Amino acid sequence: MLFGRTTLSKFVIEQTRGQHSEMGALLIDVAAAVKGISALVGKGALSGVAGSAAAINVQGEEQKKIDVLANEAFLRHCEWGGQLAGMASEELEEPFRIPDDYPRGRYLLVFDPLDGSSNSDVNVSVGSIFSILARSTAGAAQKPDFLRPGHEQLAAGYAIYGPATMLVLTVGTGTHGFTLDRESGNFILTHPAIRIPAATREFAINTSNERFWEPPVQRYVGECKAGSSGIRGVDFNMRWIASMVAEVHRILMRGGIFMYPRDNKDPAKPGRLRLLYEANPMAMLVEQAGGAASTGRGRILDVVPDALHQRLPVILGSREEVERLERYHHEYDTGADRPFVSPLFAERSLFRD
Ligand SMILES: O=P(O)(O)OC[C@H]1O[C@](O)(COP(=O)(O)O)[C@@H](O)[C@@H]1O
């Protein structure tokens, strides 16, 4: 029986009443965009939009038709309501200007319309990520207006299009999960006040990049892989879905640590993930759930952006493990760590002896 349960609309109206009631209206428009994308993604090959759009986006990546449509869904659902001064999308090189025939407001919407879209071809969970900032004036937003540190975000969230579609949201009062009831079309509050356990034995990283990682990350992952035979003394499990939304969702549900670290593959790109569209919203959601989010050398939410599409290393999840990685970076940077020997290799040499 779903009547009487808290819908997303009721939740945001209650949570944003007063100073930020217009943000509540904007969040309801974001939810409408997300429902449209969910319907499209859920059709799979039947949607007729599989494959490439024959275009390259601002990230130099091949754009899929579904990326283009998801981007359109956000723009069209959110441009008209009068709450926004502008939008910035991972798919667009420059900020989107609210058309002159619509009223403008004081909020900024930043989004990645379809993260991990290459997974949609193989029927693996994908998602949309968004965040909201405010500015003091309500004219058309310019690029510098978006370059605010993540701790100024007023709201952040993601939608995950998996077996169920969920919208996970924070407006600065904890992190809360809503499940789409496909029959009524409502998002229903099913996961109030999500908490990430401080300790975990599950890590997520793309280990095919291991040779490119910095030593503190090699040290940490080496120790996890050595498990009960190494200095951690416990066995760890590993996961890699290659879809950040799905990885963060798993961490919010049961703990864990997710890493996309700096590597030396391409010195021009300090990490793969984008500060504004991916790292900041996820960092706010994770912190609001009691977890931590770091570059390895500082809190993600304190990074002051210098470009719209800036990338950075991302380490987030269970607090104790994120703090351990920060300590390993500090020890490495200050020369205080012992010479690094992978515990895996140490183990093997024991066997040789
Ligand atoms: O190819 P890899 O190293 O597995 O990368 C996976 C990562 O790339 C992403 O898919 C982001 O890529 P896009 O922004 O290009 O969709 C993340 O969701 C995920 O964590």
Image (cartoon, rainbow, N blue to C red):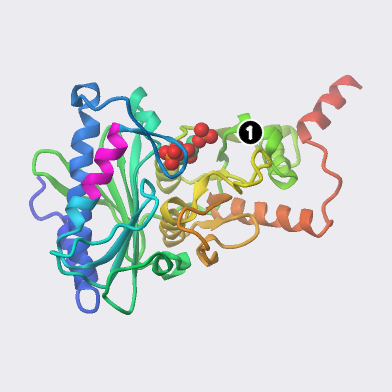
Q: Which residue is identified by label 1? A: 209
Left or right for 74, reference 253:
left
- Judged left or right of residue 154, residue 34 is left
Q: Quadrant of residue 231?
A: top right
Q: Position of residue 50 (x, y in %)?
A: 28, 25
Say which of 265 and 100 sits in front.
100
| Amino acid type shown at disc 1 | Asn
In the figure, 181 relative to 10: above or below? above
Query: SS of the residue at dot 1?
Result: helix
What's the residue at 45%, 68% (across, down)? 148
Q: Is mark 1 within 8 Å of ligand 1?
A: yes
Give the magenta range.
Answer: 65-74
Q: Position of residue 292 (x, y in %)?
A: 53, 58
Name which residue lies at 45% across and 36% down: 61
Let me know if residue 201 appears in the view.
yes
Circle 1 residues within 10 Å: few <14, some 14–19, many ≥20: few
Residue 227 visible in the current orientation: no
Q: Quadrant of the C terminus?
A: top right
- In the image, 46: left or right of 199? left
Q: Is residue 233 above or below residue 81?
A: above
Q: Position of residue 174 (x, y in %)?
A: 36, 63
- Viewer-nearest residue: 61 or 31: 61
Report the residue at 35% width, 36% height from top.
126
Closest to the observer, 54 or 206: 54
Residue 69 within the segment the image draws in magenta: yes
Percent position of residue 313, x then y: 58, 50
